[in-house]
Every structure is written in structure tokens, then in C-alpha cells.
């Protein structure tokens, strides 16, 4: 695995909208492993492929304090969003800046695993906040 360079604001490549993942091959598994290593090395709770200049709909997360609940979401789609909460968010692409952002407090997500199989999950709390933050990156926001 390798630690990848993270794009920093205002790099215009952060504005590129990610394309769906269609091939679930060994190169994708390598990218997932590299993103995992990069997220942990940088102390992040999430990382979107956009941030490492890979414009594919792929994000990784681990919001646990024990740093042992690694999750991968490929081609994520929200199936519902409800409620609202405001959270202070950081961003590995905007180091040192924190901002209050309002997000849905409960979301349903349909996504694919690294092997291409589908799963659905309901997220709340920091999981929901982080997933929405990473999906914004995939949209070039
Ligand atoms: O996508 C990114 O830039 C990663 C970002 C994700 C994120 C942080 C806070 C709220 C929503 C999404 C980070 O992980 S920045 C680091 C950070 O803020 C943090 C690190 C450890 C614990 C809690 C927050
Ligand atoms: Zn970010």
C-alpha cells in the first residue's frame, strides 16, 4: 500500500465530478488499500477518491475511536434523508479550517462493496455527517 498525495483547496481538480465505478478489478482493490492507508496516516475519519485525484465514485470511512471499523462505499446513493443537525467539520483538503455545516441527521445509503455486491445501510450521527461530506467531494463540491 502507499500513502497518496491529497489535493488541497483551491486545486481545480477538487471540482471534478466523479464517474461511476464499473470495473471491480485488482487496480480498484489497490486504490482502496492506498486510500485506507492515506486516511489513517492523515488522521481523517473519511476520504473521497476525488481528494487523491481519482475521479471515481469511491469513498472510505472510519469514524470509530478505535480506528478499526473501516468501511468502503462505491457508487453511493442516498435512498432517504431526514432530520437536520449542525456539526463542525474539518477537511483534509482544507487543512486547519473548520466550519459549521448543516446535514441530514439520518440517511439511507445504497452502495457497492469492493467485490461489486450491493448493500444498504442506515447511518446516523458522525457516520451520516461523514458520508454526506465525502459524497459532496464526489460531486466536486
Ligand atoms: O473528507 C475529508 O476531508 C476528511 C474529513 C472528513 C470529515 C471530518 C469531520 C466531519 C465530517 C467529515 C476529516 O476526517 S478531517 C479530520 C477531522 O476533522 C477529524 C479527525 C478525527 C476525528 C474527528 C474529526
Ligand atoms: Zn473533505
Image (spheres, rainbow, N blue to C red):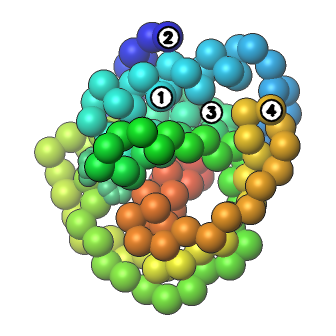
Q: Secondary structure at mark 4?
A: loop
Q: Nearer the viewer, residue 115 or 98?
A: 115
- The image shows residue 100 at horizontal and vertical percentages of 25, 71
Residue at 49% over, 51% down = 134
- Circles 1 and 2, Cβ within 8 Å, touching? The answer is yes
Badge 3 or badge 4: first in the primary sequence: 3
Using the image, determine if residue 67 lies above or below residue 40: below
Task: Mark 3 and ligand 1: say if the CB distance to the nearest ligand atom is below 8 Å.
Answer: no
Badge 2 or badge 4: first in the primary sequence: 2
Badge 1 or badge 4: first in the primary sequence: 1
The residue that label 1 is drawn on is 36
- Circles 2 and 4, Cβ within 8 Å, touching? The answer is no
Apparent side of residue 66 relative to residue 13 in the rendered image (left or right): left
The residue that label 2 is drawn on is 1
Outermost residue to the top: 1
Camera-near label (3 vs 4) is: 4
Camera-near label (3 vs 1) is: 1
Apparent side of residue 76 relative to residue 106 in the rendered image (left or right): right
- The image shows residue 89 at horizontal and vertical percentages of 28, 60
> Residue 13 has which mark?
none
The residue that label 4 is drawn on is 115
Q: Label 3 neighbourhood size at 10 Å, few (<14), some (14-19), many (20+)?
A: many
Apparent side of residue 120 relative to residue 47 in the rendered image (left or right): right
**Which of the 4 quarters of the picture holds residue 40?**
top left
> Residue 55 has which mark?
3
- The image shows residue 47 at horizontal and vertical percentages of 45, 40
Q: Label 2 neighbourhood size at 10 Å, few (<14), some (14-19), many (20+)?
A: few
Badge 2 or badge 3: first in the primary sequence: 2
Q: Secondary structure at mark 2?
A: loop
- Circles 1 and 4, Cβ within 8 Å, touching? The answer is no
Q: Secondary structure at mark 3?
A: loop
Amino acid at each position: 500500500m502507499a500513502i497518496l498525495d491529497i489535493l488541497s483547496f483551491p486545486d481545480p481538480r477538487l471540482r471534478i465530478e466523479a464517474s461511476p465505478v464499473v470495473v471491480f478489478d485488482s487496480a480498484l482493490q489497490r486504490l482502496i488499500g492506498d486510500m485506507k492507508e492515506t486516511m489513517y496516516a492523515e488522521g481523517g475519519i473519511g476520504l473521497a477518491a476525488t481528494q487523491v485525484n481519482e475521479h471515481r465514485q469511491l469513498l472510505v470511512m472510519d469514524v470509530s475511536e478505535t480506528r478499526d471499523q473501516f468501511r468502503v462505499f462505491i457508487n453511493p446513493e442516498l435512498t432517504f434523508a431526514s432530520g437536520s443537525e449542525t456539526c463542525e467539520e474539518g477537511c483534509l483538503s482544507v487543512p486547519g479550517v473548520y466550519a459549521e455545516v448543516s446535514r441530514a441527521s439520518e440517511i439511507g445509503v445504497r452502495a457497492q462493496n469492493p467485490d461489486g455486491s450491493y448493500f444498504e445501510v442506515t447511518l446516523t450521527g458522525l457516520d451520516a455527517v461523514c458520508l454526506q461530506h465525502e459524497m459532496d467531494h464526489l460531486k466536486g463540491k
